Every structure is written in C-alpha cells, then in structure tokens.
C-alpha cells in the first residue's frame, strides 16, 4: 500500500492582543516541531514574502497563541516567544517565529516561597507551584504514585514509597531562594523517582520514563539483499563514555573527616566501563543519607544520569510520522522503538524515545528525527 502524505495544519487561536482568530493555514516555507521530555515543546516557522509582515504582524507577535496539528492530531499548543523578520535587497522579507508551551514560563518564573510543603502530596505540591501560570488539575497527567506525601513519601493508606527517599526536613523541602517553578518541581519529583514534561496535547505529564513498554516503532538499516525493508535515511549511533564512572561511591553519615569510614556507604560498580580500560572513580559525600537503601538508590540514580549517552541513537527518516506499511503512526516521546542494523552493530533491540523532531521545508520535504537511549539506561 502506498504511503499517505502527512498533513500539517497550523491554527492561530489568538493574536498578540488577545483577540480570538480561529484561522488555520498550511502553507509555509519551513516548519519544525520538537517534543522533548527534558525541555519545553516548541515549533519554529518561516513563511512569507514581501507583503507578509503587514498582514501577519499581530498574529505572529510575541504572545499570539498557536496550535499545530499533524495528521489531525495536535502536537503543540503554545505562544509565540520570538519573532525575527530578516530582509535584504535580493530576497525580500520573510517572517520567522518560535512557539513554545507555557512550561517555558516555569523555567524562568520564581516559585512562590509560600507554597505549603508539610502534609501535602507530591501531586498537590506540583499543582500549587504551577497555579500562578494558569494550570489546573485537568492540565496534568499524574502517575498514581504522586499521591504519596511530599516529605515522608508515605501513602495516605499506610503504604510505603516505591523508592527509598533521602531524609528531608521541612525547611529543606520549601521553595529555595531564586528557585524557578520548574527547578523546584524537578527537585522534589526526582527525589520521588519522577520527572515532568510537556504532553503533545498541551498537558503536563508527571511520571517516570517507561522503557519497559512494547516498541511502537520498528527501524531497519541493513546491507545488501537484507535492505529491502530499510526505512531509515541515517542512523548515528552514539557510544559516549565521557561521563561514565567506573565506580561511583556514595558516603552517608559518620566518618567525619575521613568519609571512607562512614557507617553508611554504597559503591555502584560498572564492569563495562572498567573492562574497557577506563579508570573513573567518583565520590559523593552526602551526610544526610542515613541508611544503606538510601545510599544505594542515590548511587544508582547518579550512575544512570551519567551513563545515558553510553548507548544512544539519532534516527532520521522520511515523513512526519512512522509508516507501518498500512497507516501513519504518530511520533511521540515516552515510547520505545526496535532497531535492527548490521551497519551500527547488529540486532540492537529496544530503545527509549525521549526527543522527537519533525521538519518540513521546500527543499528537503518531510523528515523526522528521533533521539533514543538504550532500554535500561534511563533510571530515576
């Protein structure tokens, strides 16, 4: 069955003066839509000719609200944050602008230091942090585990947290001076084994990367007669050991000046790094850690953060969606893909998708790029 062309529609919700527009268009010189679980989602546009600016000024000025649909599914809802109008004598003028979600405000806006931390759940704390930005409970997708207490980690029915928590006092839990909304939310969420990111439909997901799910996408880059089912334009494999520790030790209470005698300590050993000849011991002293479980969890989490680039891919392919031979499958973060390539190392298995970029322009047509990491490397 021949592949169906991808459809793109851009909707202008409001202009920069707050006037409802309700206008849709699908013609532009170039478009890029990026969803990334580590950064606010954004869309970049270039459009127009000599007469464009006069007709579009209010519609593309900072503050104007946009929504981008690909194959009738929304992938970003946000506001114009930056406009650029380059003009020269030979090519005239074009309009370039960038749309980002309101989570970009959270990265800059100072968190309210009066937000309550004692006796509240992780869920309620995050909602209070984001309230000044206009977010309500319906604007979030919460993991059920966020019902646990912010400080103690206990569930109201008496259950225990899924991960051991470092001891935390009320003063330490409060919003710290100069801390942004996103920084404060991240600090507490990561302590509980969570993070938060933009959902394509405009909501915010609060959860953990789920790399144990079945693959949604299947990619092939094989040589010779085995290449009949190839569907990648390029596959760049990244094996970066620059930050990978050979041994990572976390030392908690005790030991005083000689941390090596601490009563609580845990060493996370990476045999793979050692066997490749790297000598990179890392020491983390954290007096607040009082149990072996806390020390082990802290060590594993830090080890994971440093190892994420040990096995990653940038995958590039035709289209703004993935074609399974019968239909266009939408590209989403927090999914997994299966990779087979005799060029990059043979049957490679399952990888977690954390960044999706889709591009359309007049010279290259439609292309997408996924940034993925090997299953098991991203652990909170």
Image (cartoon, helix red, strand yellow):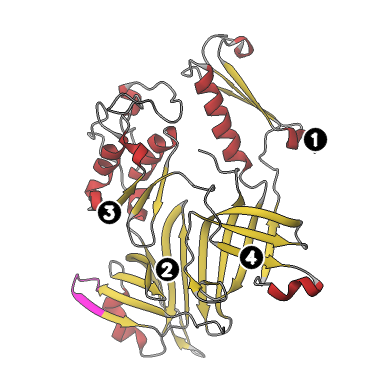
In terms of secondary structure, where does tag 2 sit? strand
Q: In the structure shown, which secondary structural element does the residue marked by tag 4 occupy? A: strand
Report the mark closest to the observer, 4 or 1: 4
Residue 152 visible in image: yes
Q: Assess whether residue 18 is covered by the magenta stretch.
A: yes
**What residue sits right under mark 3 in the picture?**
139
Does residue 107 lie above or below 229 as drawn? above
Q: Are marks 1 and 3 in contact (CB under 8 Å)?
A: no
Tell me residue 51's x, y (percent): 36, 90
If the image is split into quadrants, where does the N terminus sit? bottom right
| Occupied quadrant, residue 340 | bottom right
Which comes sooner in the sequence, label 4 or label 1? 4
User: As displayed, is residue 268 above or below residue 60?
Assistant: above
Q: CA distance from mark 4 to mark 3?
A: 33 Å
Distance in Å between CA atoms under marks 4 and 1: 30 Å
The residue carrying pointer 3 sits among few (fewer than 14), some (14 to 19) or many (20 or more) residues within 10 Å by Cα, namely some
* Precedes in sequence: disc 1 or disc 2: 2
For mark 1, what is the residue? 275
Mark sitting on residue 219: 4
* Neighbours of disc 2 within 10 Å: few (<14), some (14-19), many (20+): many
* Inter-mark Cα distance, 1 to 3: 47 Å
Q: Nearer the viewer, residue 173 or 311?
A: 311
Q: Which residue is mark 2?
A: 43
Image check: 343 left or right of 315?
Answer: right
Q: Is residue 135 left or right of residue 365?
A: left
The segment highlighted magenta reads: 14-22
Question: Looking at the image, do the residues carrying marks 1 and 2 touch, with CB atoms under 8 Å apart?
Answer: no
């Amino acid at each position: 069955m021949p592949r169906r062309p991808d459809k793109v529609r851009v909707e202008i919700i409001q202009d920069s003066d707050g006037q409802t527009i309700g206008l849709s268009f699908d013609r532009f010189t170039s478009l890029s839509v990026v969803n990334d679980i580590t950064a606010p989602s954004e869309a970049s546009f270039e459009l127009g000719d000599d007469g464009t600016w006069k007709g579009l000024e209010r519609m593309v000025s900072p503050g104007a609200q946009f929504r981008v649909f690909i194959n009738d599914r929304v992938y970003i809802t946000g506001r114009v944050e930056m406009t650029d109008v380059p003009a020269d004598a030979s090519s005239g003028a074009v309009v370039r602008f960038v749309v980002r979600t309101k989570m970009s405000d959270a990265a800059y806006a100072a968190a309210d230091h009066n937000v309550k931390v004692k006796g509240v759940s992780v869920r309620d704390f995050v909602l209070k942090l984001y309230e000044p930005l206009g977010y309500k409970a319906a604007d979030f997708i919460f993991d059920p585990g966020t019902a646990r207490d912010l400080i103690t980690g206990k569930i109201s029915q008496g259950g225990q947290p899924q991960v051991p928590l470092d001891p935390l006092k009320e003063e330490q839990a409060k919003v710290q001076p100069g801390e942004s909304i996103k920084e404060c939310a991240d600090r507490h969420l990561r302590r509980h084994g969570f993070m938060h990111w933009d959902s394509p439909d405009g909501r915010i997901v609060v959860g953990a990367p789920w790399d144990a799910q079945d693959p949604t996408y299947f990619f092939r880059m094989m040589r010779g007669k085995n290449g009949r089912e190839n569907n990648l334009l390029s596959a760049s494999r990244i094996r970066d050991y620059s930050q990978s520790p050979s041994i990572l030790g976390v030392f908690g209470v005790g030991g005083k000046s000689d941390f090596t005698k601490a009563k609580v300590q845990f060493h996370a050993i990476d045999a793979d790094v050692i066997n490749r000849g790297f000598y990179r011991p890392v020491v983390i002293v954290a007096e607040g850690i009082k149990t072996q479980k806390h020390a082990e969890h802290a060590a594993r989490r830090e080890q994971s953060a440093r190892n994420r680039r040990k096995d990653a891919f940038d995958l590039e392919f035709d289209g703004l969606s993935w074609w399974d031979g019968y239909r266009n499958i939408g590209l989403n973060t927090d999914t997994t893909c299966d990779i087979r390539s005799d060029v990059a190392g043979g049957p490679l298995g399952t990888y977690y998708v954390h960044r999706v970029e889709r591009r359309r322009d007049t010279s290259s047509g439609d292309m997408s790029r996924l940034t993925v990491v090997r299953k098991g490397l991203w652990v909170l």
